[in-house]
Image: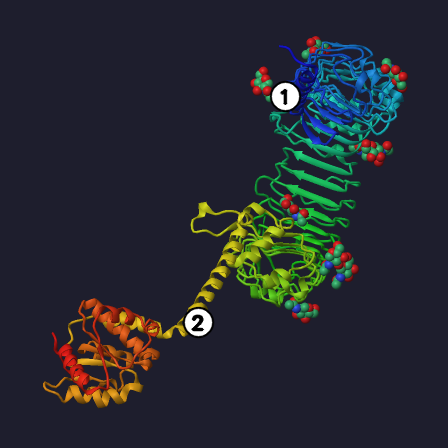
Amino acid sequence: MIMSNGERMIFLSSIFILVNAGQGQECTELIKNKEYSCSGRNLTCIPGSLPFSVASLDFSFNFLTSLHKRVFPVMLNLQLLDLTRCYIRQIEKDAFYNVKNLMTLILTGNPITYLAPECLNSLYKLQRLVLVDVRLESLQLQINNLTKLQDLKVGTNCIQSMTLPSFMSTFKDFSLLDLHANNISIIRMDHTAVLREIGRNMTLILSRNPLIHIEPGAFKDVILRELHLLAAFISFNAQKECHKALTGLTVDKLFVGRYRMDEKIKVSVPDYLEGLCSINFNEIYLVQKEWSDSEMHLFRCMVNATKITIKKAYMNSMKHIPFHRLKELYLSDTGLSVVPFISHIPSLEKLVMKSPFPITFTGVSDLPLLQYVDLSGNMLILHECCSILFPRTPNIQYLNLSQNSEITFVNEPFSALDLLEVLDFHHTKLVIVFYFGFFKHLRNLKYLDISYTRVHFNTLTFQDLHNLTVLKMAGNSFSGDKLSYFLQNLTSLEVLDISQCGIEKVSMRSFTGTQKLRHLYLSRNKLMVLDFLTQPELTHLTSVYIDKNSITTIPLDVLQKLPMNLSEFDLSSNSIDCSCSQTDFILWIIQKQNILKQLENIRCKTFSANTDFKAIDFDIDYCVHKKRLTIVLSVICVTFVVVLAILLYKFWFYVQYCFILFSGYRSPGQQECSYDAFVIFSSYDEAWVMNELMENLENGVPPIQLCLHMRDFQAGKSIASNIIDEGIMGSRKIIVVVSQHFIDSSWCRFEFELAQSRFLMERNANIIIIILEDVAERKTKKVFGLHKHLKKNTYLKWSRDPLSNMRFWIRLRKAILQK
Ligand SMILES: *[C@@H]1O[C@H](CO)[C@@H](O)[C@H](O)[C@H]1NC(C)=O
Ligand SMILES: *[C@@H]1O[C@H](CO)[C@@H](O)[C@H](O)[C@H]1NC(C)=O
Ligand SMILES: *[C@@H]1O[C@H](CO)[C@@H](O)[C@H](O)[C@H]1NC(C)=O
Ligand SMILES: *[C@@H]1O[C@H](CO)[C@@H](O)[C@H](O)[C@H]1NC(C)=O
Ligand SMILES: *[C@@H]1O[C@H](CO)[C@@H](O)[C@H](O)[C@H]1NC(C)=O
Ligand SMILES: *[C@@H]1O[C@H](CO)[C@@H](O)[C@H](O)[C@H]1NC(C)=O
Ligand SMILES: *[C@@H]1O[C@H](CO)[C@@H](O)[C@H](O)[C@H]1NC(C)=O
Ligand SMILES: *[C@@H]1O[C@H](CO)[C@@H](O)[C@H](O)[C@H]1NC(C)=O
Ligand SMILES: *[C@@H]1O[C@H](CO)[C@@H](O)[C@H](O)[C@H]1NC(C)=O
């Protein structure tokens, strides 16, 4: 192939473009020029198309085998590099030279067999190093340059000793050493020397190691933020002894026990947690999977704790423990069948208990600082509530009894709990014995959730709740009218949820008191109109949810007066009427896409459910065209009618003529002729007709019966019908008296034309023309057919000469009598 230079240039540059385009698709750009993901693309090298400026690169699940200097292009802005499971076996000395500003390096899950001694040292800015599951055998890494290191995660390796390299004691920011799932079985004094020197605010994770022995005092004077010891011991005895050996350790949060998914184990040494008493901790998290026939004193060593979280335990009862610093107690899934009667813990502020099976609650008492009580989701049945269950606990502010079975309230249930700010009963059946004064005293209440509680609102009033900002009462049925009085005093209300309450209409008075309302939830009701949203009390609304109602349209005047700051409006799952009469509303939907929620579910009402379509897909242009077309058509119609009217007016005579023409001969021949001849003449010639024509013909022998309009036409009948019925149709012959006046008279012309058309149809020359006076030939042309008639047929000419007069009458008679 021979190419010119120019062609070659084009050829090469097109290859370049193709290659580049191909490479662009290898990685996904998450943030332009900064964050890229090439995860799982089966790549064998770092794509050259990545910009120099890339800061974060996820290159996990590819094939790299070996890391050396040329693997990475120069990326000096790169801060995070994820090389999880890239089959990396070797990491050479200068491997990270081109990415030396890394702050996070993740090498999880690579079968590394060779790690060049100095290779990590070029990463002197590194803060997080993740070497999980890389076949690491020792913590003696050459990372002396990594003085900014904070997190070192080396879980799931074969490390046998937790001894850190001595230079790490100078790493000021070092705060996390994750050694989970390694092979550490023994910890001796000298293994913790660096730890002791770092000595502050560090998290140490030793979970899932086969610990057998810790040299007593190994952790003496070690201060940790967190210590994780879940499933960290080879046996219960080892656990007990190792816990004991931790004496002198100070730790803020201690995680002990097992993992939740671990199997349940029967234990023969019920005091296996005894050793915890040697550890100085504030907070403890326990997952207990061990159970025993004899009683286990779970809390004995927790007496000095400030926070106890039991995520799982096997307890029969909870004895009174003289906790003196305890602030928070979380008991979930403990095996207790009753909420322990906790009392006289002066420091307790928070009590949370959750149980997967039904429990009972008889109360707690003498907890002066108790503020927060969450007993939700326990299938509780309470026969009386609530003050009576909390004697001498005056500070309760939060009470969550939601998702329980049934709670019965007797008179003034919150009388001693007047600091309550949050009260949650949702999805619990409430049985209220005395409605009056139910929420009395709750002047500080800010949050009230009585959704799905089957409460009867007929008599319930919120009269004292002036501070209430959130009221949720979805899923209870009451009519919209109720709203108009029970919201009146809720002047601080900002959030109101009355979804699924069967509301059909909201009265305009409902919100007169609630002028701060910002969020209104009205989903799943039966609303058809939304005009209440325009009232001035609701101007602060920012979100309105009216999905799943029966809204078909919102009139333009309502749309224009919707609250100004509305930024969330959920109209979805209503059957919108998408017809051209609603273009204003649909246009509004299209324009307000930014505030409308679940746009794809705002669908148009159609006759069958599976053909419905999104309201924003409605073709407004179609309506515009249709409207335009209608206008154009109407204009055309109107114009046509007007023109027609003008024409009709102007040519009325001809119209009538045509009408008669066609209607007059509907039944020709059926009529008996009652006259011998019909005379068409101008009224100016009446004298001649009366004196001469009538005289001579009617009084002659045989007499000829003439039809003369002034004499024979029936009164009350229109002239036109008379002409047809009496004259033309009722006479055998037509006599036309042509004169100057005849020519000028439109009636005469009309009669003549009618006559012609009759005989034209009957093909019978029965028109007899009498020329009374000479008329210019030019003028005869004015009368349709006359000129032709005169040329083709003989006619009679009247003259005053008596001789020719005589002949005239003879001929005329003959013509008339001729069949
Ligand atoms: C990567 O390769 C494996 C087999 O080697 C294949 O199953 C997988 O679909 C490939 N993935 C991609 C994104 O090409
Ligand atoms: C250690 O970091 C210094 C800069 O702090 C650098 O000059 C030196 O080359 C680094 N050592 C290695 C082995 O990269
Ligand atoms: C764990 O360490 C013991 C010695 O303490 C050794 O015998 C065993 O092979 C190691 N296990 C693994 C999986 O490396
Ligand atoms: C301990 O570490 C946490 C987070 O790592 C930090 O917020 C806290 O200030 C540190 N405390 C001390 C005393 O260094
Ligand atoms: C609780 O703290 C006191 C000192 O305040 C100490 O004497 C006692 O041994 C501690 N108890 C436990 C179980 O840690
Ligand atoms: C009450 O508890 C339930 C269930 O744990 C939870 O979903 C709800 O958010 C809690 N209520 C409040 C007000 O925190
Ligand atoms: C609302 O609560 C505040 C304290 O949060 C309280 O000072 C005020 O008296 C309460 N208002 C009413 C009307 O009770
Ligand atoms: C509103 O409060 C006033 C005074 O506290 C009370 O008289 C009235 O009954 C209350 N109205 C409602 C509907 O609770
Ligand atoms: C709407 O929002 C603006 C700014 O967030 C605020 O200044 C204004 O008062 C709000 N208007 C109403 C009616 O709430």
Count numbered badges in the picture: 2
Real-space Cα separation, disc 2 to disc 1, in angstroms: 82 Å
Observer-side mark, 2 or 1, equals: 2
Q: Position of residue 495 (x, y in %)?
A: 67, 55
Q: Is residue 425 visible?
A: no
For marks 2 and 1 on the same chain, the one whose residue lies earlier in the sequence: 1
Q: Is residue 757 above or below residue 377?
A: below
Quarter assignment of residue 229: top right
Camera-nearest residue between 614 and 488 = 614
Answer left or right for 302 relative to 685: right
Q: Is residue 490 above or below residue 752?
A: above
Q: Position of residue 689 (x, y in %)?
A: 24, 86
In the rendered structure, which amino acid carries the disc numbered 2?
Ile
What crowding class fits label 2: few (fewer than 14 Cα within 10 Å), some (14-19), or many (20 or more)? few
Question: Which residue is the site of mark 1?
Answer: 41
Task: Pick the quarter of the image with the N terminus.
Answer: top right
Q: Is residue 56 visible?
A: yes
Quarter assignment of residue 234: top right
Q: Which mark is residue 646?
A: 2
Q: Position of residue 211 (x, y in %)?
A: 73, 18
Q: Dot 2 lies on which element?
A: helix
